[in-house]
Image (cartoon, rainbow, N blue to C red):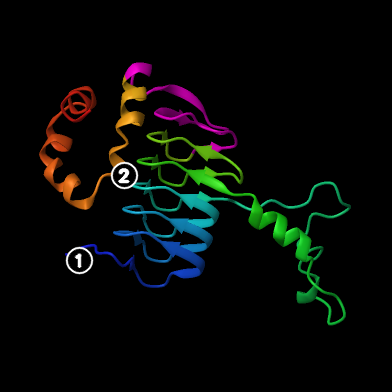
Amino acid sequence: MTRLSENPLIHPDCELTEVTFGRFTEVGRGSRIQNSHLDDYSYCDRLADIANAQISKFANIAAFVRIGATDHPMHTASMHHFLYRAGDYWDDAGNDAAFFANRRSRTAIIGHDTWIGHAAMIKPEVTIGTGAIVASGAIVTRNVAPYTIVAGTPAVKLRDRHDPGLVADLLALAWWDWSHERLRAALDDFRNLSAAAFVQRHG
């Protein structure tokens, strides 16, 4: 078993372009990530496709997830990428720099301690709140509130993970900002206590 460290663990066959990493991060085999940041302890499983995203701490991203899925122009006569990748088709035509700059600016934000299920899709400019769960196969087109569970195509709210008071307490506790040593010291409590009991002990 490979133990994670300060440096990212990158499995084979990944394509990484303009990606930065926090500590104890991991990228699954065959994943493609561009113009994105994975903060401390976050990981994606195999064949994830992530673009133009800010991934907060402790994000759990399952296999085949797509974050920041790109759009095509719908207001023009054609939607095909020859419009903005013209240089791939003609020697005397350049690519549309403004189109690509706009695409890069449409950042998806994934909050702390989130769980993005197998083959889910998160559209550009969507924020997944801290503690939220996105069900397998969901297509998320709107922001998801913290500690909310969403599912479906398009994704809709199923329920809250915790009552509002506990959510407020968890957000105030912000355990995801604890030191590596403090997390280790509290490991048994993370494993064995309910969320409410954990907040009561550590809040």
Which residue is more in the foreground, 125 or 81? 125
Looking at the image, is mark 2 or mark 1 earlier in the sequence? 1
Q: Which residues are magenta?
A: 138-165
Residue, disc 1 = 2
Pinpoint residue 49: horizontal percent, then vertical percent: 50, 57
Residue, disc 2 = 177
Q: Nearer the viewer, mark 2 or mark 1?
A: 2
Q: How many marks?
A: 2
Which residue is more in the foreground, 110 or 183? 183
Q: Secondary structure at mark 2?
A: helix
Q: Amino acid at mark 2?
A: Asp
The residue sitting at 55% across, 46% down in the picture is: 108
Asked if residue 158 lies in the magenta stretch, the reply is yes
| Residue 161 in sight here | no
Q: Quadrant of the N terminus?
A: bottom left
The residue sitting at 76% across, 68% down in the picture is: 85
Q: Is residue 34 above or below residue 70?
A: below
Q: Is residue 154 above or below residue 103?
A: above
| Residue 56 in sight here | yes
Pinpoint residue 158: horizontal percent, then vertical percent: 44, 23
Please rate how many residues cluster around mark 2, counting C-alpha atoms within 10 Å: few if below 14, some from 14 to 19, many from 20.
few
Q: Is residue 136 left or right of residue 182?
A: right
Pinpoint residue 192: horizontal percent, then vertical percent: 12, 32
